[in-house]
Image (cartoon, helix red, strand yellow):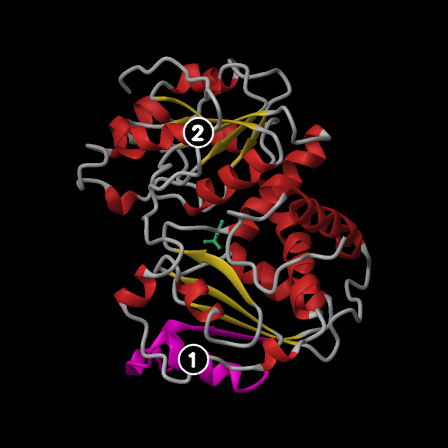
Amino acid sequence: MPFAHRHLLGLEGIGREDLLSLLDTAASFKEISQRDIKKVPTLRGKTVVSLFYEPSTRTRASFEIAAKRMSADFVSLSSSTSSVTKGETLLDTARNLAAMAPDAIVLRHSAPGAPQFLAARLGCPIINAGDGAHEHPTQALLDLLTIREHKGRLHGLTVAIVGDILHSRVARSNVFALRTLGAKVRLIGPPTFLPPELRAWGETTHDLHEGVRDADVVMMLRIQLERQGKNFFPSVDEYSHYFCLTERAVGLANPDVIILHPGPMNRGVEIASDVADGPYSVIMDQVTNGIAVRMAVLYLLANRPRTKADLDVEAPTAGPLAARSLATGPLATGPASPPAPPARPARLRRRAG
Ligand code: CP
């Protein structure tokens, strides 16, 4: 079944068939990266532009590698080296790039809703490479692909997600997709990162050992150290004392547990080095799968036949990116807004972290 969307803005609302189509397409592209000559003509003549307003290693590099392995032309721009430094707005920047007829724009931006903002105004496919605390859909897709490869399925697995759930775009995208595909989600973190409204996403606990017990998958999140001292956690030492994934904690999970981390890691803060580099870690598999997932996303979106609607550049009166514009986007309810709660959600016992 073909992918039914013009853009990839998030995984909220993406149905089971489309998720499986993305994963199956990605799986079929993996073999290309194992060849001596890692190039196919699939996107020859297509142009992909990446526009990053935030730093990135994995996402940016893997989009570029993915595009080039499919023979697309790839243009990479960052806010620090573009005319953004001269005060150009996101919309003006993107409209100028769109006037050069790219076949997809990959956007990372600190403002939640920025990709939706552009998708409503430009004629070419927009791919969200991470927007604030909202979503990071390709990260979650590569996580799903990695889990499915190791476990053979997603349905029925218990996935424990540990850390700054509230501010994590990785957690949000994963929660949406994992639930759609029938996995059971457990959320673990201190109360400041796991407010009561997030209980609708899955089981919650503030106790790491309780949360990882019998889990099939443990997904650690990066602690944003810049939040230290902002009433989210008192100190890095205290956070790591309660929530660092150690070998002892891993021993409570299922014997065939796998450990994921989206990177960049804070070794010794949210994950111990011997766990990050240990036998249960699939962190490098995640990075490898990032190429295949981004190849699949580019293939399904940039290669799609263009309709008249795609070619119409909309909203000639649209102004600069403004709070009001973003407020009309999907994050008007803020990053803490959970999906509809499941019927009678089971809940782990809460304990102070
Ligand atoms: N996981 C992830 O998004 O990493 P980067 O910030 O390096 O792209």
Dot 1: element: loop
Question: Residue 109 versus residue 250: which sits nearer the camera?
Answer: 109
Picture coordinates of residue 135, whole percent (x, y): 45, 50
Q: Is residue 172 above or below residue 81?
A: above
Residue 301 is drawn in which quadrant? Answer: bottom right
Q: CA distance from mark 2 to mark 1?
A: 50 Å
Left or right? Give the position of 157 relative to 9: right
Secondary structure of residue under mark 2? loop
Q: Which residues are magenta?
A: 74-102
The amino acid type of the residue labelled 2 equals Ala
Residue 83 on the magenta segment: yes
Examine the rendering and report whether any part of residue 56 can be seen. yes
Is 59 situated above or below 50? Answer: above
Mark 1 lies on residue: 315
Can I make out residue 82 in this image? no
Which of pointers 2 and 1 indicates the residue nearer the eye? Answer: 1
Which residue corresponds to the image point at 65% horizontal and 42% vertical from the top-left? Answer: 16
Q: Amino acid at mark 1?
A: Ala
Q: Is residue 33 left or right of residue 171?
A: right
For this rendering, which residue is in front, 269 or 110? 110
Identify which residue is drawn at 39% across, 62% down: 54
The C terminus: image quadrant = top left
Residue at image location 43% in from the left, 38% down from the top = 221
Q: Quadrant of residue 111?
A: bottom left
Residue 3 location, x and y as percent? Answer: 69, 57
Residue 114: % across, % down:
40, 64
The front one of 187 and 61 is 187
Ligand 1 lies under 8 Å from the Cβ of mark 1: no
Q: Which mark is residue 272?
A: 2
Residue 282 is one of the magenta-drawn residues = no
